[in-house]
Image: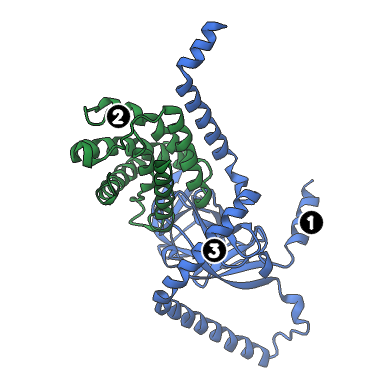
Chain colours: A blue, B green
Amino acid sequence: MRSLLNFLLRFRTLILFLVLEAVALVMISTSHNYHQTVFYGISRNISGFVAKRLERGTYYFRLRQVNDELVRENTILKREIVSLSSARQEGITAVTDSVNGVNYTYLNARVISNSVNKQKNFITLDKGTRHGVALGMGVASPSGVVGVVVGVSRNYSVVMSLLNTDFRLSASIARNDYFGSLAWDGSNYRYARLSEIPHHVMVNEGDTIVTSGFSAIFPAGLMAGTLTGEQKRGGDFVSLKVMLSVDFKKLTNVYVIGNLTREEREKLEEEVVQ
Amino acid sequence: MNSIIRYTVTFLLLIALQLLIFNNIEFSGYVNPYVYVMFILILPVAMPSWILLLLGFLTGFVIDLFSGTMGVHTFATVIAAYVRPWVLSLNVTAETAEGEMSPSSYRSGLRWFLVYTATVVLAHHLALFLVETFSFRLFLQTLLRVLLSTAVTTFFIVLFDFIRPHR
């Protein structure tokens, strides 16, 4: 007993060290659901508040780039209006119940904090449950896919960025509809990899990669990136290097995408699988 | 009592500096300076190691809480606090052995402080980036991040050491 006590006394620093490191490791290993905890909610409210104040200052200096982006998007929308109205005139489609066709809702939000230099990057937005943001909603910018909402409080939400090594996106090659899984490897923030594409698929440099629409988070056909032509072979599949369409260093305005029929779809899929 | 207040203010300043300025530095993805380690470095020489460890835990935990990286900084900062007495005893000089004193370049010379800071920061960054990546895949790339970030962090800590008031 005495020698045990002596032993504990002698190594008390080492023991305390090991205990503290064990606590830290437990914290790391449970961090996957960390973004839902109350604890994080409080800290998010404080840091969100500070980040919002800071962002207000820096936003001014990015107005020029934001403007360019909006003009570009306007042009695309105008083109779409023209094509839609001409289609109506020809009498090809007559939409009587317009509500029925709407599947996705779009809510604009401002990025108030963002990073590209970690392995697991997260983005904070200035919209929360008060504005209708919910867990699992998709986030996109005018130029493409950005991430998925993983935490919400009343006024803020936290998005798991595509630049997060835990993030997987079901994406397909727009030209031939072959689909695979798009993920970031943690190195360069401009590139990601599209894996699980079969050998025999013909791909060209510059092919467009879009969302597949299989996950009910993003609508199908949302831009994700373009192929660089570089590929890696392994087994029956190739993985293709993709240049992301979104420049995460310049992210300012994004859309939070809600799927109105998501619950119904997931319930049905669950019922059938079980 | 006076020194407790002084260290608390230093603690808050370093945390604010880290979260508001240094966390936003994104230079090629390879340089992520974590200057808050300075708090562990400048605690009094005679501080018992168990208090050091607890303070290291607290510092890392606060950083984790605000940057959304649960446990990663805590793990690394506890390692920094654990190696500190050992690094101190390796380069002990007559000057540094005095109890109440805080390690600084002012008392012990720039060269001594540089070596001391770089060693502890290296241990911290090595643990931090390895745990953050959580694999030995891309090991060389992680190592490059560690070395570049260590250099930049050390530079800033030495700089701050010059401008902080010494009694």
Q: Residue at x 42, y 47 (%)?
A: B11
Q: Which residue is mark 1?
A: A268
Residue B34 seen from this side = no
Q: Position of residue A30 (x, y in %)?
A: 60, 40
Q: Residue at x 41, y 64 (%)?
A: A249
Q: Which residue is mark 2?
A: B88
Residue A76 seen from this side = yes
- Judged left or right of residue A131, residue B24 is left
Which quadrant of the rendered structure holds the C terminus of chain A?
top right
Disc 3 with disc 2 on a shared chain: no
- Residue type at mark 2 is Leu
Q: Position of residue A188 (x, y in %)?
A: 39, 54
Q: Is residue A108 above or below residue A186?
A: below
- Judged left or right of residue B90, residue A254 is right
Disc 2 with disc 1 on a shared chain: no
**Mark 3 surroundings: few (<14), some (14-19) or many (≥20) residues within 10 A:** some
Q: Nearer the viewer, residue A122 or A101?
A: A122
Q: Which residue is mark 3?
A: A49
Q: CA distance from mark 1 to mark 3?
A: 40 Å
- Judged left or right of residue A239, residue A102 is right
Q: Nearer the viewer, residue B56 or A62?
A: B56
SS for dot 1? helix
Q: Residue at x 24, y 38 (%)?
A: B113
**Mark 2 surroundings: few (<14), some (14-19) or many (≥20) residues within 10 A:** some
Q: Residue furthest front?
A: B1
- The reply to whether the C-beta atoms of the residues labelled 3 and 2 are less than 8 Å apart is no
- Residue type at mark 1 is Leu
Q: Residue at x 29, y 37 (%)?
A: B103
